[in-house]
Structure formats: structure tokens, C-alpha cells
Amino acid sequence: MYYGYHIMVGLGTIFIGIMVLTSFLLWKGRLYKTKWLLWILMFMIPFPYIANTAGWYTAELGRQPWLVYNLMRMVDGVSPTVSSGNTLFTLLGFVGLYLLLGLLFLLLVLKIIRKGPEATKMALK
Ligand code: HEM
């Protein structure tokens, strides 16, 4: 939980710094000529996903052992009518669905990258 929280906040702070710098250079009309920052921006693509996952870890691990703080523990939230087989089946269904959506996402992103940016919007002089 400690690392989850610090990874999230660390990345969030880095994102804010990069956003301020990027906005400033965009405003000054120098962003598209500042190659090192464009590289950083491209390599930053996976990090919001990592921050998201770390944030979720923080929330889920941080609330243990409570389902509803001070009212209901996790152990009391187990449903006697849902079997472990049902849970596994649903889990596999979600894994399959998100795998499909993830692959679709990658394919679409690759398609956009291959197409490249529109030259007219690049303000390259
Ligand atoms: C300065 C930066 C940030 C601060 C101070 C911050 C703070 C927090 C706090 C206090 C929580 C609640 C933890 C709890 O349940 O008690 C949280 C949850 C979360 N954060 Fe962050 N966060 C930051 C950046 C980010 C970033 C950049 C992302 C994603 C791109 C992110 C994604 C999440 C997610 C997904 C949760 C879990 C929400 C939930 O399921 O309830 N956070 N954050």
C-alpha cells in the first residue's frame, strides 16, 4: 500500500511538472521543435495506466479489513449463495473481455501512430 500510494503520487507530481512545461512551450510555439520533450511525452504513455493501478491498489489495500468502514468487515460480505465456480467463471469472462478491449486499444493506437501527426497542425516553420 505504501509503495502503491507513493508510485501514484510520484507519477501524478511528475505529470503535473511535464504538463506545465509542455503547456508553456506550446504557448511559446516551441513545443514541436523541442525533440527531447516530445520523446518524453511519447514514453509517458503507459504511466497513467500504472498510476491508475497503483491508486486502485491504495484504495483496495488501504480499506482492509473493512468493506464499509467501522460497520462491516470483508469477511462478513461473503455471499453464501455465490459459489467459487461462479466467481471464477465471471472472473474469466472479465479477463477475456478486457483482453479483447486491450488488444483493440493497442491496434487502434498503432494505427494512429502509423498514420502520424497532421503536418498542418504541427506549426513547423
Ligand atoms: C499528486 C497526485 C495524486 C494524489 C495526491 C492522489 C491521491 C489519492 C488518494 C488520497 C486516493 C484515495 C486513497 C484511498 O482510498 O484512501 C487516491 C486514489 C486513487 N488514485 Fe490517486 N492521487 C494522485 C495521482 C493519481 C494519478 C495521476 C492517478 C491516475 C492516473 C490516480 C489514480 C487513482 C485511483 C484509480 C485511485 C483509486 C480510486 C478508488 O478506487 O477509490 N491518482 N489518490
Image: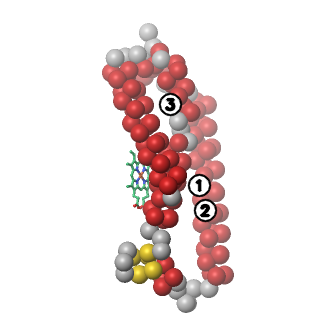
Mark 1 vs 3: CB contact within 8 A: no
Of mark 3 and mark 2, the one earlier in the sequence is 3
Name the residue at 61% across, 78% down: 87
Residue closer to the observer: 51 or 119: 51
Name the residue at 65% across, 63% down: 96
Question: Which marked residue is nearer to the observer: mark 3 or mark 2?
Answer: 3
The residue carrying mark 3 is 41
Residue 99 point in image, percent of width and height? 64, 57
Of mark 1 and mark 3, the one earlier in the sequence is 3
Farthest top residue in view: 125
Look at label 2 and name its amino acid: Leu
Indicate the quadrant containing the C terminus: top left, top right, bottom left or bottom right: top left
Q: Of the numbered discs in the image, which one, if any, rests on residue 101?
A: 1
- Element on which disc 2 rests: helix
User: Between marks 2 and 1, how big is the CA–CA gap?
Assistant: 6 Å
| Left or right: 76 in relation to 98 | left
Farthest front residue in view: 2
In the displayed structure, 26 sits above or below 50; it is above
The residue carrying mark 2 is 97
Residue 120 seen by the camera = no
